[in-house]
Amino acid sequence: MISVAGNLLSLKKAELIARLCGSKDSEVLNKAETIAREMIPFLNCKYCFSEVSVKINDSDIDFGFAKTQSRSLAGYLGNSQSCCIFAATLGLDIDRFIRLKGTVSITEQYLADAVASTLIESLCDYAVNTIPDADIKRYSAGYGDFDIKFQKPIINYLKKFHDCNISLTESGLMVPQKSVTAIIRKRK
Amino acid sequence: MNILENLKNRRLYFDGAMGTLLQQKRLKTGECTEQWNITHPEEITAVHKSYIDSGADILCANTFGVNSLKYADCEPYIAAAFDCAKKAVGGMENKYIALDIGPLGKLLKPLGDLDFEKAVEIFANTVRIGVKYGADLILIETMNDLYETKAAVLAAKENSDLPIFVTNAYGEDGKLMTGADPKTVIATLEGLGVDAIGLNCSVGPDKMLPVIKTYGKYCSLPIIVSPNAGLPELKNGKTVYDITADDFAKCMQKIATIGATVLGGCCGTTPEYIKATKDLTCNLELPERKVTPKTVISSYTHTVEFGDIPILIGERINPTGKKLIKEALREKNYSYILSEGVNQADAGVHVLDINAGLPEIDEADALCSLVYGMQSVSNLPLQIDTSNSLALEKSLRIYNGKPLINSVSGTKKSMSEVFPLAKKYGGVIIALTISEDGIPDTAEGRLAVAENIVREAQKYGIKKQDIIVDPLCMTVSSDTQSANITLNSVKLIKEKLGVPCSLGVSNISFGLPKRDLINSCFFTLSLNAGLDAAIMNPFSAQMMNAYYSFLALSGKDKNFNKYIEYSETVADSTATVSTVFSKKKSAMDSELTLSRAIIKGLTAEVKSTTEQLLLTKNPMDLIESEIIPALNEIGTAFEQGKAYLPQLLISAEAASEAFKVIKTKLPSSADTSKKIVLATVKGDIHDIGKNIVKVLLENYGFFVEDLGKDVDPEIIVAAAKNAKIVGLSALMTTTVPAMEETIKRIKETYPDTFIVVGGAVLTKEYADMIGADLYCKDAMDTVRAAQKIFG
């Protein structure tokens, strides 16, 4: 996986406000920014991607390593013949940081969680910019009718070629929790 | 010849990859290699034979991916694997077949959802079968999590007498995926008593060199190295690796000179790689490695070494003399206790003491919960502090790393209970200089007890470097010579026995007023006498002043970095001015009502105002007239969309601060008549929403039993017995079935219990569908519901 320095990520205000359920209170936002700075040493941001061929027949999609059925994903891919399989994570220490915050203050834990959710999106945006010809829009398992269980074959495939340390719990939650997997089409 | 005997005299060679060769033989995508043990045994045997022919001494039976998470019945695969390997060995002497155990593919709790004991049982099943089919040794490999490694090692130790070899998979950052650095892995595995350790997989031999050098410097066991053939890439639909056999072997030659005595290959390697490696290294002399014994403990990420800089052990998690800790233990409110640990960590301690010794509770259960809980929020090593041998055993078993064990004494009973546990699970033991005759009143007497303890420990196979002696501080208020005796004991024990010393420093002043004055002076004297570790209160400014000043004055603080950093946190000596100022400020702030302070979330002001008001007001009056109205005002604003969740939380936390102060004035017992059980259901490891609900409910006077996350339905049903309301949360659609199952089981057993549900994925319709009594959209909604239900 490719490492990214934590201080290269940006805390987009609009995204953060959305994750704080709309709160624009300046004290809250300042506190969130302070927590973001505290978080930097705990960040172990990484991403990886592999290009694969894809065959689409109506809603049947064959990536070669696995197949799925999804009308919405087929719509996103259009008539692509290849796409990127992508994963990114902020790392396990962020899970610990958020848990640690919970012992001190539920508010700080809540803010830390919101900040981390904003930062993983920032990591994905940063990473996608480095992938040749990649569209900025990503499509993750769980969107539309794209089965969330497809996270498993994505992670298993990426593990073959990258040091992809993302795993899934029995119920399909990713660990580290601030991780993303996605299909990325080519830019039109 | 036994493999361990063989290893003393020569280098041994593992085989290389199995999967790489089977892919050349058309192993299908998605097909597991172990399936070929049954469908293509002749191919497996052929691969093994090719490695024997290339010079391998140890074959890994093709069992890496076989476990009961994957297969209901593992035995056919393991039996077939050993059959294939034995055919390849064909009775040759000094060839060994290893039961090959790989990771389970699931992260253990608290990070993931696999229970530690469940992991031990899964590995144990594999070990039992491997022993049955004639394994010569057990290889636990490619482990990228220290906790999972420990589970596998315990399974191996508890189910066989075979030699245990362990290799871990380090990332490019030189750490395991879950954060352990090499010194931590070495300390933990040596503590567990395995026979050889090292690294495999992830990268090629060149990238392994920094980690191997660390092993060379700190590892006293034989070192195993089995790298990949570099990095994989997909070329023309095939996976290829970027290091040739010759380059691989050259690098392995360097690795052999550093000190590795067991060499092999992992992904991408073939018999060619093993032959090339053996050709270049088999005639090299076995290196003489001199590893200096060190007294080391670890958490799951890093080690703490005794003997260089004096170590601070935070003493605050101990119910003795602490009303709030006692209450928290009785109520199983572990989050309060964990916050004490986190605060001590912030204050600068290196190790946290964990003591749950309260007669009226299940100490083993409490201690385990605290050890587990503390390790899920802090990466400091822990000192497990108990005289209850069951509590000690259970907590040592689940500890992730190599702990500090407090303590053993010089009595036969104590030594016979503690030493076997320390030998099995690993740990550094604090040895108290108490014999069958009590505490000697001379330094020489305490030295004699210490010597006896060290001698006895060695009979159990516990090395001297895993003992720290505590010559005990008796209070000077009952014996004016006790400080001198202790200081002389420290000097004598360090000189004659050569082991580190620790003290529970604050004992020296028991019974005297202004204890910190005595404690801090005694602390300095002890440090000067050579004290290596102190169990102390890091919130005492005088103690911390003494510590950092000592480091600076004794040359243990290069460039005074630690002292300068610490000094910036210390109030200026013109504190009288700032004290007056802060008193004036308090006076101004007291014009700020308690209600307003809560609404504004001014935690410090809430605390000071509550303390002042309690001088003249009844606690219950304060709650009714100031706190509840404040919560209602912010709660209503939240419900009307005029305030948002962060503001609600900030106010709730400020209110919690007021309650903490009030609790010290109210009778100890918690009011359980308004009991609510909360849990995040099985399979779901998110809990922030539930924690928010808990804080608000407690503020409104409800007694909350928080069962945590990923909770089995049976546990929730059991807790529902005396609860009027059970609150369940779930975050994902995949975990809602678990919620439905839990609701069904509660209703079957306690039909009158009210079930309230919430969580990101839920709606009222869904809640109705799964049998819940009520759906609450947010934390405030839950509070209103609870108020209505309780009436």
Image (cartoon, coloured by chain):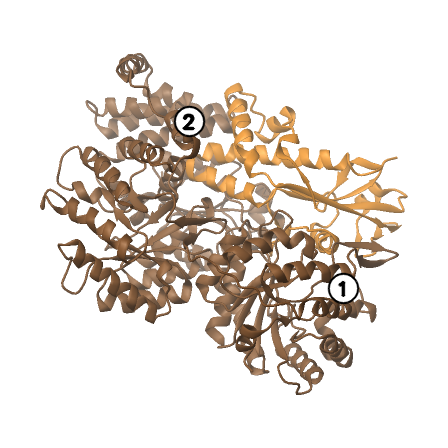
Chain colours: A orange, B brown
Alpha carbon of mark 1 to alpha carbon of mark 2: how far? 54 Å
Q: Which mark is residue B374?
A: none
Q: In the displayed structure, would residue B245 be above or below residue B549?
A: below
Whether residue A184 sits left or right of residue B557 in the image: it is right
Q: Which residue is mark 1?
A: B30
Q: Nearer the viewer, residue B671 or B150?
A: B150
Please rate how many residues cluster around mark 1, counting C-alpha atoms within 10 Å: few if below 14, some from 14 to 19, many from 20: few
Q: Position of residue B140 (x, y in %)?
A: 58, 67
Query: Is disc 1 in the same subunit as disc 2?
Result: yes
Label 2 marks which chain's residue? B
Q: Mark 2: few, some, or many residues within 10 Å (few <14, many ≥20)?
A: many
- Measured as percent of width and height from the top left, residue A107 is found at 47, 32
Residue B22 spot, x, y in % from top left: 78, 70
Vertical placement of residue B678 versus B232, above or below:
above
Identify the residue under disc 2.
B651
In the displayed structure image, the side of residue A15 where residue B376 appears, left or right: left
Does residue A148 appear to the left or right of B144 in the view shown? right
**N-term mark: 1 or 2:** 1
Image quadrant where one finds the C terminus of chain B? top left
The residue located at (68%, 61%) in the rendering is: B252
Looking at the picture, which amino acid does disc 1 mark? Answer: Gly
Secondary structure beneath disc 2? helix
On the rendered structure, is B415 left or right of A111? left
At label 2, the amino acid type is: Ser
